[in-house]
Image: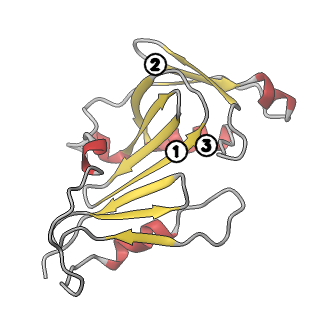
């Protein structure tokens, strides 16, 4: 949607507990966390810039600390840490320009209040949205169960894959 550039973007949120990559298309939302200490920052970048970033810097939860992040008022600078250089990762510096527009407050969406939802009540979910989560890749893990939690027939379905990925799927009306 050209009117909403954040829908073609990835939100990066850094802090002492990790670096989170968050993306949404209005019907699904996914959040992947790379554990480790990062400076506190939040920026939304183009999806293509994120693809480039992930090709240049093999960020994995198994090997945190491979990326040094520099935050300025108008850009995010990324470069391999000394540990990454020791592993043979190219000494490339990347400056990412933020996307205009405000990224939705996704953290609030994960604060679902449990309701009196009775098992057996029907809930509708578009199967294409479930398939999106099946394409999530993990560091060497080939068997991670997709867990889905339903709190209400009208609330978003909570999805988790391992410890570092969570998501939401918006239900459809039956």
**Apparent side of residue 147 relative to residue 85 in the rendered image (left or right):** left
Q: Which residue in the structure is indicated by mark 1?
A: 33
Residue 1 in view: no
Using the image as rendered, state which of residue 3 and residue 16 is in the foreground.
16
> Crowdedness of circle 3 by 10 Å Cα count: few (<14), some, many (20+)?
few
Q: CA distance from mark 2 to mark 3?
A: 17 Å
Residue drawn at point x = 48 percent, y = 40 percent: 20
Q: Regarding mark 3 in the picture, which secondary structure is present there?
A: helix
Whether residue 67 is situated above or below residue 159 in the rendered picture: above
- Residue 130 on image: x %, y %: 39, 73
Q: Residue at x 55, y 60 (%)?
A: 162
Q: Position of residue 152 (x, y in %)?
A: 19, 69
Provide the secondary structure element on which disc 2 rests: loop
* Residue 154 appears left or right of 88: left
**Which is more toward the observer, 145 or 51?**
145
The answer to whether residue 121 is visible is yes
Write down the residue under mark 3.
Answer: 54
Question: Of the residues under marks 1 and 2, which one precedes in the sequence?
Answer: 1
Residue 101 image point, x, y percent? 25, 32
Quadrant in the rendering for residue 142: bottom right
Under circle 1, the secondary element is strand
Name the disc covering residue 75, or none: 2
């Amino acid at each position: 949607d050209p009117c909403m550039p954040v829908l073609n973007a990835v939100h990066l949120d850094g802090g002492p507990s990790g670096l989170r990559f968050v993306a949404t298309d209005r019907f699904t939302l996914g959040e992947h966390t790379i554990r480790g200490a990062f400076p506190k920052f939040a920026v939304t970048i183009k999806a293509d810039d994120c693809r480039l970033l992930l090709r240049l810097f093999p960020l994995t939860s198994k090997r945190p600390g491979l990326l040094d992040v520099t935050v300025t008022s108008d850009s995010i600078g990324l470069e391999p840490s000394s540990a990454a250089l020791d592993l043979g990762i190219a000494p490339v510096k990347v400056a990412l320009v933020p996307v205009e527009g405000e990224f939705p407050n996704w953290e609030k969406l994960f604060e679902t209040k449990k309701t009196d939802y009775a098992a057996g009540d029907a809930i509708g979910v578009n199967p294409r949205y479930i398939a999106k989560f099946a394409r999530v890749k993990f560091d060497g893990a080939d068997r991670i169960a997709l867990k889905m939690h339903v709190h209400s027939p009208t609330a978003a379905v909570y999805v988790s894959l391992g410890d570092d990925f969570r998501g939401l799927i918006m239900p459809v009306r039956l």
